[in-house]
């Protein structure tokens, strides 16, 4: 895409430099619509940028709440891995997930280990699909997510893993996936997936991604089959008290992270985009418009054989030219010429209209007035 834009910019530049009037007119006509085309092509990136811009105003508050959610998620993931229960938990960060939340069943319930364990029970009506977490609340369950179409992904990955990767390709969310076949825990971030994580490693990664430190929680013991048969349904999943977070200074650690995210991440693409924007600005931007009046001699050309011009009412014309000020100031009379074609005349008096088509000026300038507007010549046979 960037290469294509660079080619168009170079084509526009050389069209003006080489005075290719047709190509110059075509590019000048289409150029205003390029802005709308860029908006359509880069709509996803623009949406992400606007979402990030809106959330940076309150980054301090959102950082605290984002770091308080993963403890119960780690406990639940450990339970699902022990029981080989399939689960998909998506944690919202800066970019909103309202589109995916609306595809599921809204809950708006406080996040807890017990609720997650209940939602992903195989017999529960909401166990299919994803659970989306917003800060310290479960926004919705049984949500539909876009499947990743990345051909590099292993063919052994099922729908649950591809959905977890797909949502992280389009947003900055974090997806925790537990395999129903093997009980392996995976973590998807930015379109990449980390597989076969231990519970301790999962907790470390969530701590890094959500920018918060918390002490390691006490993991629950696996649920035995006889416990499920003898005890009532409410006690099938052991409750675990939420861990207490040690005080930290998120603002101190957030500023370097924010600086790195804005200026360091994807530095190559940012530099290319900046250079491209500067190039387009230099090509498209025009200096203030100015006008100048020049006295230009009228050139009578292509006089037929055996005919000569006896007289004319004007040998010079005043040409008013408009264009960018930097070009108008350097314009000289020798750069402009007015031509009258006498190839079709016969002996007698003839009147010709002087139009911008009869005046040759640089392609970036425009002829706005010609005086006189008509030229009369008297032709006679040569002796």
Image (tube, helix red, strand yellow):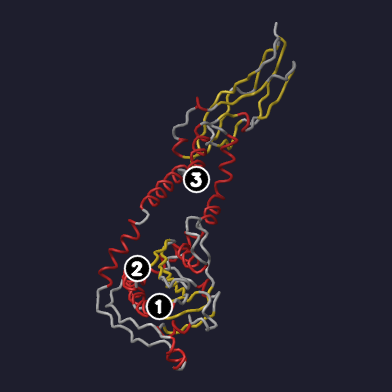
Indicate which disc residue 299 carries: none
The numbered mark, 2 or 3, whose residue comes first in the sequence reads 3
Secondary structure of the residue carrying numbered label 1:
helix
Q: How many circles with numbers are drawn on the protein?
A: 3
Taking the image as shown, residue 137 lies to the left or right of residue 61, namely right
CA distance for labels 2 and 1: 24 Å
Q: Nearer the viewer, mark 2 or mark 1?
A: 1
Residue matched to label 1: 82
* Residue 85 rendering spot, x and y as whole percentages: 46, 77
Q: Nearer the viewer, residue 85 or 332?
A: 85
Residue matched to label 3: 5
The numbered mark, 2 or 1, whose residue comes first in the sequence reads 1
Q: Nearer the viewer, mark 2 or mark 3?
A: 2
* Residue 35 rendering spot, x and y as whole percentages: 53, 52
Position above or below: 329 against 62: above
* Residue 42 rendering spot, x and y as whole percentages: 50, 56
Task: Rate crowding at label 2 as few (under 14), some (14 to 19) or many (20 or more) other CA atoms within 10 Å.
Answer: some
Taking the image as shown, residue 240 lies to the left or right of residue 277, namely left
Residue sitting at 52 percent across and 42 percent down?
8
Residue sitting at 42 percent across and 63 percent down?
193
The numbered mark, 1 or 3, whose residue comes first in the sequence reads 3
Indicate which disc residue 209 carries: 2
CA distance for labels 1 and 3: 53 Å
């Amino acid at each position: 895409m960037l290469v294509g834009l660079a080619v168009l910019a170079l084509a526009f530049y050389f069209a003006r430099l080489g005075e290719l009037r047709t190509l110059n007119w075509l590019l000048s006509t289409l150029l205003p619509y390029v802005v709308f085309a860029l908006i359509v092509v880069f709509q996803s990136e623009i949406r992400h940028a606007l979402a990030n811009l809106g959330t940076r105003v309150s980054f301090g508050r959102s950082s605290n709440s984002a770091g308080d959610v993963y403890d119960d998620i780690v406990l639940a993931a450990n339970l699902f891995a022990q029981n080989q229960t399939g689960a998909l938990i998506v944690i919202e960060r800066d970019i909103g997930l309202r589109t995916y939340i609306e595809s599921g069943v809204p809950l708006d319930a406080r996040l807890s280990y017990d609720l997650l364990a209940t939602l992903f029970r195989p017999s529960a009506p909401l166990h299919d699909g994803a659970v989306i977490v917003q800060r310290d609340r479960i926004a919705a369950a049984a949500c539909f997510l876009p499947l990743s179409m990345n051909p590099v992904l292993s063919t052994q990955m099922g729908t649950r893993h591809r959905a977890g990767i797909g949502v992280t390709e389009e947003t900055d969310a974090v997806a925790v996936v537990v395999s129903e076949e093997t009980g392996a825990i995976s973590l998807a971030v930015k379109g990449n997936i980390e597989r076969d994580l231990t519970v301790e490693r999962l907790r470390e990664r969530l701590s890094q991604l959500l920018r918060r430190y918390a002490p390691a929680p006490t993991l629950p013991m696996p649920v035995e089959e006889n416990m499920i048969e003898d005890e009532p349904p409410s006690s099938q999943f052991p409750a675990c008290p939420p861990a207490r977070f040690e005080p930290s200074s998120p603002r101190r650690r957030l500023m370097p992270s924010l600086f790195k995210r804005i200026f360091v991440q994807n530095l190559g693409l940012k530099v290319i985009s900046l250079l491209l924007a500067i190039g387009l600005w230099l090509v498209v931007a025009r200096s203030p418009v100015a006008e100048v009046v020049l006295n230009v001699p009228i050139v009578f050309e292509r006089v037929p054989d055996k005919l000569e011009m006896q007289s004319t009412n004007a040998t010079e014309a005043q040409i008013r030219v408009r264009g960018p000020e930097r070009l108008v100031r350097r314009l000289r009379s020798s750069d402009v010429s007015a031509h009258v074609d006498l190839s079709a005349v016969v002996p007698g008096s003839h009147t010709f209209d002087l139009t911008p088509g009869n005046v040759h000026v640089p392609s970036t300038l425009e002829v706005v007035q010609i005086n006189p507007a008509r030229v009369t010549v008297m032709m006679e046979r040569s002796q």
